[in-house]
Image (spheres, grey):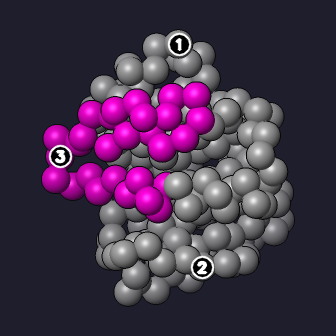
Amino acid sequence: MRIIGGKYRGKKLISPMSEKIRPTSDKAREALFNILRSRLGSDFGGLKLIDVFAGSGAFGLEAISQGFAEVVLVDIDPTDLQKNVALFANEKNKIGIVKADATKKLLLDKKFDVLFMDAPYHKNLTEKALIALKDLLNKQALCLIEVCHDEICNLPDGYETVDERKYGQAKVLIAKVTC
């Protein structure tokens, strides 16, 4: 696992120790950041991203490398992601870690422009988390929601699917917050 672009391109990340963590592939991350650029422009400097079910933290740390102003990583067990965050000591003021169940309402004092979510496959956590996170997202926030390719994910009220992509076993729903 490595950072695929930006300031820290090529930086190696520590692979997760837990078999429960399934990092988004380098290829899929690269494609998703290309999608972000096409929809948001190439300057991420004013944007905040929340990475939910963050696992290793690879997606959020990629966002830091590619210029996001701030990233918050949320996971019920942040052990693995803390090791990778420690590799970015120069960026510690831009990275927050929240140990929490993402299906429960999070009490954070900020709103986010981009959501990346990669819940464990086939556990019915995605919809619950989207409901719990809604108040943390700016109107028109862009959401990248990874599910298994054969999983059906009905977005709750307030979200609208704008695109869908497949990467191996993963399907990514690209959605916007509508209200």
At label 1, the amino acid type is Asn
User: Does the residue at mark 2 contact the one at mark 3 (Cβ under 8 Å)?
Assistant: no
| Residue placed under numbered mark 1 in the picture | 90
Of circles 1 and 3, the one toward us is 1
Asked whether the viewer can see residue 141, the reply is no
Counting from the top left corner in percent of width and height, residue 111 is at 73, 41
Residue at the image point whose x is 33% and y is 70% from the top: 121
Counting from the top left corner in percent of width and height, residue 113 is at 74, 48
**Range drawn in magenta:** 1-29
**Cα separation between marks 1 and 3:** 27 Å
Residue at the image point whose x is 56% and y is 50% from the top: 105
| Residue placed under numbered mark 2 in the picture | 164
Residue at the image point whose x is 83% and y is 65% from the top: 179
Mark closest to the chain's N terminus, 1 or 3: 3
Q: Residue 18 carries which label?
A: 3
Judge whether residue 18 is colored magenta.
yes
Q: Nearer the viewer, residue 173 or 11?
A: 11
User: Does the residue at mark 1 contact the one at mark 3 (Cβ under 8 Å)?
Assistant: no
Mark closest to the chain's N terminus, 2 or 1: 1
Q: Decide: few, some or many residues near mark 3? Use Cα within 10 Å; few <14, some 14-19, many ≥20.
A: few
**Cα separation between marks 2 and 1:** 35 Å
Q: Residue 103 carries which label?
A: none
